[in-house]
Image (tube, grey):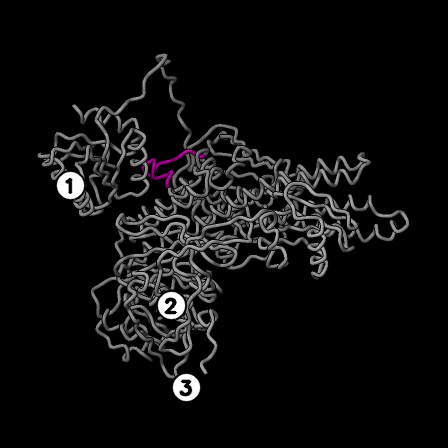
Amino acid sequence: MPNEVDLTNCDREPIHLLGRIQKFGFLLATDKNWIVTHVSNNADTFCSIAPADLLGAPASQLLPPDTVHAIRNRLQMLRPHSNVELVYDVAIAESSDRFDVSVHLMDGHIVMEFEPAGSQNGLSTDVANVRSAINRMSDLDELKALYSHAVRFVNAITGFDRVMLYKFHPDDSGEVVAEVKRTNMESFLQLRYPASDIPKQARALYLKNPIRIIADVSDQGAPILASIDSKTDRQPLFDLSNSSLRSVSPIHLEYLRNMGVGASMSISIIVRGELWGLIACHHNSPHTPSMRERNSALLFGHMFSMVLETRLAAQEHENDECVAHLTAEISKTLSSYQNTPDLLRSSTESFAKILKADGYALVQDQDVSVGGTTPDHNDILEICSALNAKPGNEVFATHELSQFLESAKRYSAKASGLLSIPLSRLPSDYILFFRKELVQQVRWAGNPQKVVTYGPNGSRLQPRESFEAWQAEVKNTSARWLPQDLRTATQLRIMLLEVVLRLTDEAGRERKLATERQEILIAELNHRVRNILGLVRGLISQSNSGNQTAAEFVEKLDSRVHALALAHDQITQQNWSPASFKKLVNTEAESYLLEKKNRLIIKGEDVLLAPQAYASMALVIHEMITNSAKYGALSDTTGVVHMDLEVEIDNGLKILWTEKGGPKVTPPTRRGFGSVIVERTIPFELAGKTKIEYPPDGVIAEFSIPAQHIEIMQQPDPEPEEIIPAFEPEPQASLKLRSILVVEDNFIIAMEAEENFRTLGAAEISVVSTVEAGLEAIEAASRKFDFALLDINLGGNTSYEIGRRLKAEGIALAFASGYGEGVTLPDDLATYQIISKPYDKDAIARLLDLSRT
């Protein structure tokens, strides 16, 4: 008789111990003495050294000194439990090619994975695009728009045919909530996938290794050769959890082939330490984004996760504030309100609205008071009896009441969802909130109930072969209760426990009073702890409280690097010349304080900082702002920070940082990396002075920057008063717009151009990023384009070939350039207009007028 087969067979497959890697790169592992212990057997496809000859040999046989030096430097940055470090553009022996390397540590081995180097062009631009994409998301109000922006950006930087945002539901099934794809592909938007499609161990690896590439689903992988362990006389099993080249489960490869997918990539979206969803990428044929492109996608995934976490926390905070206000109002009434039962009913009715409940019942000593749509009296008492049988005395919620109590199917139309709040430790006293049945039509990607079949590897569940949309009607369920609903119920219970005390018989009041007060205190303590955790979660740069882990340290370090990047951008905008100090502070405040930025008040004369000082002060100001947001005056709702700037007699700059109105300050008991930055950066790098004190009413810091780093800003002469006409019409595009072609290789600029043309009335806009794609778009267009805007420089190419093709077809066009006025067009295109970047809608409208004439 065959072994029993169920969905846990997939969950038990050791997908991190397959012992193979994908063939678009090769693996080399050494011990601490840099002696090769493991090598993939495809290494000789990248160099002329046989893999067997590398085993037991010094790594220097393959790795030149410069490469070893670069890898050692990245190893220095690895910490316990951290994932990987990347090294770009290194050489190996016996090969004229360059390689990118992913490096991590595993069981005392140095594991290096080499793949052909991607283009070095545009690395800083990729990082800048990620930052711009995140800044753009801050202007989007709705989560749906946020989701759409995410998939469009990842599609632009990776080139996959289809990019989806896949969100997990509480039952571990997943739903495609956003999608961008090639026009000739079937849409997967809003399709649901059963939990079994992504087994448990795969979810664990998505948390541990947040980016995963499968370059070719037909690649069976290259095995890893290993030196024989002298102690066991066998090859050691090798854990590839952190490997970027790790081969793929045959079950998953078959799953992808059944979907018609040729290559895939996934980026984990992690919110509050849990897997919220995935950005899933599919390609119809083999496809390998470079390590640089994947790293940009990974960085975007990290930042998107933080933005999403902040948005979700803000929604919860708004709900919590509403609950806190209502609770406070009811609590004030308690002291003077004599008719306590009436107050209980009115309080329950108010909370029913917040909880979006269709009905409620207040049950005390078999007495039932109801409001809205509810089950009958006897049915409510039956529900209370079932609740009494549950262990504990806690808030309980279910969106499938018939699963908890089978007889509830009789009245599922009235009540399919239940949230219960016990009023005391005595049985039968409850507040019950009900939600009506929500009949849903759910579109699954194939029948969610897999048919069990036996594969060549024994009694193992095979991947399903059909992904045809399969619709199911879901009954006897309500809308799910959210975590914020449970917090609201807990708040209500805290407040109502005091009401219950008023109903207690006088004879036993003193004995029960201590017990009920203890419950109030415990519940209130729990509430306060949750509030503190909510505030901490709201900080983008810190997602966990308690002792700092390696992951938290990396996160802090990422934010400091981001601060330097912001400073670097501002300096380079001025051609590496001195830049405004106030602008530095304001940029940091906008990036990290969000809605709190107006509580950082700057007074005094602005100055220009030399580039070296600018970068140093970016780190110092970043640490002061983030520390204040976490622990100081800006960590609550009342505190402010005053920053007073004073140019001293010798033209040096004195900065006085004063925090007021925040929580009580205590001096730090330990000096972390951030404290070292604040205390030592200015004295060590700028030969200035730093003094920081921690009085109870707020941190006070004084910084002195010597004159050689300061340039006094020249005050501009007042401009003559401009006479503004009463009304100046906005420039309108005279050229008839219907179909537009935009050729632009910068994703953010392309999106802006698309929106500007759409605002000016364009109905169809095709956006491409390469010469080949532009020519293909012209060929495939069902009607001639009315106008085309061509970015001149497309990586290593120009758009002149597209311009000549459009000119031959008589299509109006213009060029765009980031090189300003110094661009000269070829003679045959010299009559066309050039628009300089950056441009806006008005500039495009004027350009269209010129093109018409």
For mark 1, what is the residue?
802
Q: Which mark is residue 230?
A: 3
Q: Position of residue 406 (x, y in %)?
A: 62, 59
Q: Nearer the viewer, residue 135 or 32?
A: 135
Q: Is residue 78 visible?
A: no
Reply yes or no: does residue 136 show up in magenta.
no
Highlighted range, magenta: 569-581
Q: Amino acid at mark 1?
A: Ile
Q: Nearer the viewer, residue 608 or 396?
A: 396
Q: CA distance from mark 1 to mark 2?
A: 46 Å
Check disc 3: other Cα within 10 Å, few if <14, some if 14-19, many if 20+.
Answer: few
Comes first in the chain, label 1 or label 2 = 2
For mark 2, what is the residue?
463
Q: Residue furthest right?
A: 507
Q: CA distance from mark 3 to mark 1?
A: 65 Å
Reply yes or no: does residue 577 show up in magenta.
yes
Q: Is residue 196 visible?
A: yes
